Image (tube, rainbow, N blue to C red):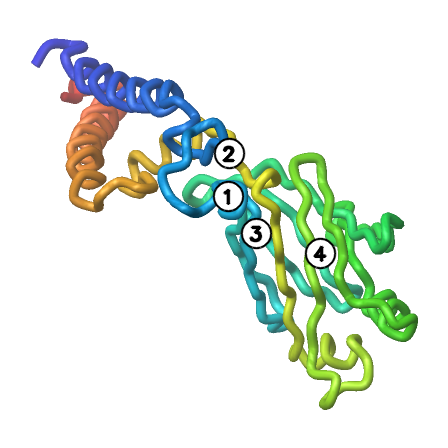
């Protein structure tokens, strides 16, 4: 091989990845989102389909959990001080873009700001749950951050526990998430797409086709990594490398 012949593989990988991203971005929106402008082909009104919300029931365990609702990555963490919920982006083991939800009841913020592990966090306290419960309110809260909003309902067995804080302390409660269609995450994240391509997890694509795309990229990437390691060894210890 020539001195830079391995760069051909790098060019091939880069072209496949970025052309794939470009083609996905160019897909007309009506192909992956519902559109009311399309003519009805059945007896069901499209507006009735759009009216359905996505829901998710999360079991409080005293630790933390990750869910995906409406296309958003959401983490729920249970502290002694209360419950925190935020959205975030991730690829493989890397996480970024944390955005904490504020909690609202009847349009009034009821969340509290804490400094935990040298980081500002937003939580709802068990005492606030008790206050709202004793006031006869449904424990249904609006969650809002800079990206989206959704509702979450704190549910527990009122026969077994007299207060929501008791159920929370016993790790025997549930959070019921609900998100409207227009609050779903329909944006395209290039970094996430790159991760989906390499991890053979493109949504809506047959697994065989996913692997037909990903496996050649894996082989090419491993070969490039091998060549680069040999060149680094050669540069550091002599011998010319590959």
Residue lying furthest front: 43
Q: Secondary structure at mark 4?
A: strand
The circle on residue 50 is: none
CA gap, disc 2 to disc 4? Answer: 24 Å
Rendering coords of residue 54 (x, y %):
54, 53
Q: Earlier in the sequence, mark 2 or mark 4?
A: 4
71 lies left or right of 128: left
Residue that numbered label 3 is attached to: 53
Mark 3 and mark 1 in contact? Answer it, CB < 8 Å: no
CA gap, disc 2 to disc 3? Answer: 15 Å
Mark 2 and mark 4 in contact? Answer it, CB < 8 Å: no
Q: Secondary structure at mark 3?
A: loop
Residue that numbered label 4 is attached to: 84
Q: Secondary structure at mark 1?
A: loop
Q: How many marks?
A: 4
Rendering coords of residue 16 (x, y %):
24, 21
Q: Earlier in the sequence, mark 4 or mark 3?
A: 3
Q: Earlier in the sequence, mark 4 or mark 1?
A: 1
């Amino acid at each position: 091989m020539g001195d830079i012949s391995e760069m051909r593989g790098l060019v091939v990988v880069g072209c496949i990845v970025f052309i794939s991203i470009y083609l996905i971005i160019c897909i007309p929106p009506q192909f992956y989102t519902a559109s009311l402008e399309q003519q009805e082909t059945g007896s069901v009104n499209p507006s009735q389909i759009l009216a359905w919300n996505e829901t998710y029931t999360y079991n409080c365990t005293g630790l933390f959990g990750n869910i995906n609702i409406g296309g958003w990555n959401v983490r729920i963490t249970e502290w002694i001080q209360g419950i925190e919920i935020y959205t975030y982006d991730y690829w493989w083991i890397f996480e970024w873009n944390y955005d904490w939800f504020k909690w609202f009841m009847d349009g009034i913020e009821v969340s509290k700001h804490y400094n935990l592990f040298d980081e500002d966090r937003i939580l709802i306290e068990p005492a606030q749950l008790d206050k709202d419960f004793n006031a006869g309110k449904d424990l249904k809260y609006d969650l809002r951050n800079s990206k989206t909003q959704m509702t979450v309902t704190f549910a527990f067995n009122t026969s077994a526990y007299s207060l929501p804080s008791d159920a929370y302390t016993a790790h025997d409660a549930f959070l019921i998430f609900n998100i409207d269609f227009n609050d779903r995450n329909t944006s395209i994240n290039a970094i996430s797409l790159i991760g989906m391509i390499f991890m053979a997890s493109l949504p809506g694509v047959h697994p065989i086709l996913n692997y037909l795309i990903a496996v050649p990229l894996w082989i090419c990437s491993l070969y490039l990594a091998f060549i680069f390691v040999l060149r680094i060894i050669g540069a550091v210890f002599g011998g010319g490398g590959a």
